Image (cartoon, rainbow, N blue to C red):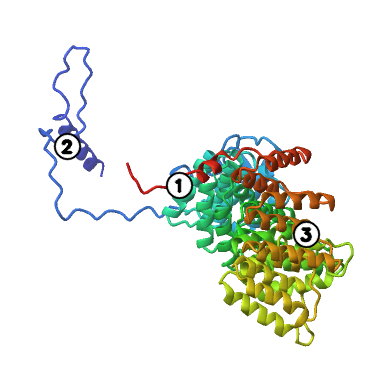
Amino acid sequence: MPSARKTMAAMILHRSRGLLPKSLPQVTAPVVRVISTFPSLFQVPQPQEAPTSDAAAPLPPNPSTGSPFYHENWRGPNTSVGIGPLLGGQALVPVGSVASARAMAYSQIVDLSSLMDVFADYMTSQRWSELKQMFELWIRSLDASGKPNKPDVHLFNHYIRANLMMGASAGELLDLVAQMQDYQIAPNTASYNLVLKAMFQAREEEAAQKLADRMIQTGIMPDDESYNLVIGLLILTNQIDSALKYMDLTIKSGYMISLSVFMDCVRSCVKAGKLDTLASIIERCKTTDQNKALCPSWNLCNHIADAALQADHSKLAYFAFEFLARWIAHGENARPPVLLSAEEGLAISALTTAGRTVDSTLLEAAWSILRRSLRRKRAPSPEAYIAKIYAHASLGQLQRAFSTLNEFETVYGNSKDTDQELFSPFSSLYPVVVACCKNGFSTLDSVYVQLENLSQADPPFKSVAALNCVILGCANIWDLDRAYETFGAISDKIGLTPNIHSYNALLSAFGKLKKTDEASEVFKHLVSLDVKPNAMTYSLLVDAHLVNRDPKAALTVIDEMIEAGFTPSKESLKKLRRRCSRELDFNSDEKVQSLAQTFKYRLGAETRREILYNLEYSTNYL
């Protein structure tokens, strides 16, 4: 064995001698030690070959999505300003406060549903800063599966609301809405509503309109809160036309307009005089189930009615009285009841407006409101009855007009305190006279026949005032025969006694046909019956003499009128002076001028009338 080992050692030593250099040069260069027993090969870089068609397939996309923290060191979360990463539940960097440390620790164990409950508690107590901090810590924490927490749209909306309540601007909230895409969250209508609230607070009406239009274009349809915010903001900045456009969209979309926005819109439209637009909005609101219950306040209803009646806008006035009726009914049904009453003057104005605009719905609404406001404690005033008669006469509803006249006579006809001029066909009841002679004698005959039949009904309806309207109507169509026959029927067929208005209507019929003698005989007849003539009697007798071109006789009647204690009207003196001028009766003209000075009338000149009177018509053309 020792000899074999020696033989092997000799062979290894012999082989190693060939790897060592035979001689070492006397230089300072480092000795190159060869560690390989193979000769070195000459290597030349080769160009890279183009990849073949059968290259390796790409990897699938990164499954780590839904949080922007995947692009960071998400395995060491909770890296934020002032807060270091957590390790074993302890921060490597000290936390600023005990509350922050508690929130950081709590965010590690809470899940999405539990966090919603925590946020609900924070919002109830208005702890917005804690809500904001909790959200920022939670999204940097890991869930039970070891992945970063992913919020949903509702949780993110709570975070946006917290920023809004802490005074964030609309631009900052829009940036937060844009960051939802980093979490693969699509913002909903509530997200944009929070931005609209910030714009409402900052009065950024142009930005609010653009945002609402953008929501419609992108398919995120605004809801009632969105439209109400935009409309309210536009009304506050006095952009009524734009506000009405969005209000129209709200109604078309079937959403409900808030009461505050509706009242602001009503005030703005009334102030701007856009009554037609306001009536259209109210009408459209009434057609939808969501908005038909909208009703302005009691004072605003009265304001709408005043504005509508001043402009003779019967449709808007009717809507205002509808609102008043709702308030009255609501007060009566309340416990304890609250009895609301509309002003009688407002109802009378509505009745006259209904007559001018020929609106039966406004007539019925105004009379109903008046009745409910009085609550049967007293009868409507004479002015209310006269206004209603005028409205029915303007509408051509003669039967209702005479029915109202009958009620009027029943309430005030026998009262000594009532002025009998209220039943005069020349003043208060003249609209009925015009309605009776609208179609000539046919209407007059029809009215007379109905009145005669009603006088024999049970209970009978007998009215001297109604027959006086027929007599004056016959006089207006120059039908003396019908006027005289109707006058005689008052006592012969109806069984009533003619009053001074009956004689005045008959006197007018004679005077228009230049039957001055007969008119004078009528005057003498009524005086002999101890019927006291009034100012209208003398005026009609003066007109009869003037038609007959007898200014002296007319001046004599004026003197008798003054002796009886009546004052001649300015119109009578002007007509008398005109007749004196045309008849060249200068003495009578001086007396008329003296009377005018006595009663302090300024008759004025009639140059234009005289020019027309003195025109010479000729067939010779130059």
Q: In which quadrant will I find the N terminus?
A: top left
Task: Classify mark 1: helix, strand or loop.
Answer: helix
Side of 154 relative to 368 (left or right): left
Against 116, residue 442 (above or below) is below
Q: Amino acid at mark 1?
A: Tyr
x%, y% of residue 171? 52, 39
* Badge 2 or badge 1: first in the primary sequence: 2
Q: Is any atom of residue 571 visible in this view?
A: yes
Q: Residue 344's mark?
A: 3
> What residue type is disc 3 on?
Glu
Q: Quadrant of the C terminus?
A: top left
Q: 608 or 191: nearer the eye?
A: 608
Q: How many marks?
A: 3
| Marks 1 and 3, the one that precedes in the sequence | 1
Give the residue at the far right of this rendering: 416
- Please give the label number shown on residue 575: none
Q: Name the one closer to the observer, 237 or 148.
A: 237
Dot 2 crowding, Cα within 10 Å, few <14, some 14–19, many 20+: few
Q: Compute the Cα span from label 3 to label 2.
A: 141 Å
The residue mark sitting in front, 3 or 2, is 3
Q: Which residue is mark 2?
A: 11
* 18 left or right of 231 in image: left
Badge 1: few (under 14), some or many (20 or more) residues near its Cα, within 10 Å? some
Mark 3, secondary structure of its residue: helix
Q: Which residue is mark 1?
A: 70
The amino acid pointed to by label 2 is Met
Please provide percent x and percent y for residue 432: 67, 68
Quick one: SS at disc 2?
Answer: helix
Classify residue 430 as left or right of residue 46. Answer: right
Q: CA distance from mark 1 to mark 3?
A: 76 Å
Task: From the image, state whether disc 2 or disc 1 is nearer to you.
Answer: 1
Is residue 328 visible to the viewer in this orientation of the structure? no
